[in-house]
Image: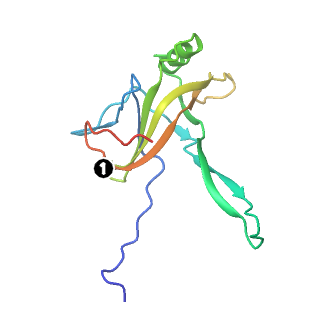
Amino acid sequence: MISPPLNPSNPLPGFVFAVSFGATEQPSCAIAAGGITETVAGFQEVTGLESSIEIHDYKEGGLNDHTRKFATNVNFGNITFKRGVALVPDLWTWFLAVRQGSFGARRTITITHLDAGGQAALIWYVSRALPAKYMGPAWNSSTSSTAIESLEVAHEGLTLIPAGAFGAGGVPPRT
């Protein structure tokens, strides 16, 4: 018998999240003392939260029954944010600033995964983000769907932080 008894973890819903883009490279967060702060824009989809470690094979001389494996560089995939076109072109403005040479326009991004009660459960902290690709809406007069724009961002770090470890004003560890 296991003591104390284990409680299974309920999976979090994938449709309840908040996104916050910092105005600068300094840490930003969608979490405030009273809960979730308002974000400039809601997103319908966020994809690409991924990180991989390159593995180097080392064939050691005289050791023929296996190959040693060593972790080397960490790579981060680009993250894509999709939303309905808004009247404020903030995603385009950020993309345009970098396109015109403002490489100091890096931002931090926090993606807060909420539980069923609307409380922060997990926080994905994205550091030193730059827009890599902007895709404007497609128009089709034969459908009644919402016009969607997307922004793909490249970044230099992805950290997953339990909500309890990231208080209001707290700074996540640099990765």
Could you tell me which residue is drawn at 47 percent across and 46 percent down?
A: 15
Residue 147 shows in this picture = no
Residue 167 visible (yes or no)? yes
Identify the residue position indicated by label 1 in the image: 165
Position in image of residue 54 (x %, y %): 64, 49
Image point (60%, 54%), residue name: 71
Quadrant for the N terminus, please. bottom left
Q: Tell me, what colour scheme is on the image?
A: rainbow
Comparing 137 with 126, the one in front is 126
- Above or below, 98 against 78 in this view is above
Quarter of the image for the C terminus: give it. Answer: top left
Front residue of 9/117: it is: 9
Q: What residue type is labelled 1?
A: Ala
Q: Where is residue 135 in the image (x, y as percent from the top left)?
A: 63, 24
Q: Which residue is drawn at 52% across and 17% down?
A: 103
Image quarter of residue 168: top left
Residue farthest along the top direction in this orientation: 100
**Looking at the image, which residue is at 43% across and 33% down?**
109
Query: Does 106 appear above or below 109?
Result: above
Q: Is residue 134 above or below residue 58?
A: above
Position of 104 compared to 4: left or right?
Answer: right
- Closest to the observer, 164 or 12: 164
Percent coordinates x, y for residue 118 in the rendering: 33, 48
Q: Residues within 10 Å of mark 1 (few under 14, many from 20)?
A: few
Mark 1 falls on what kind of element? Answer: helix
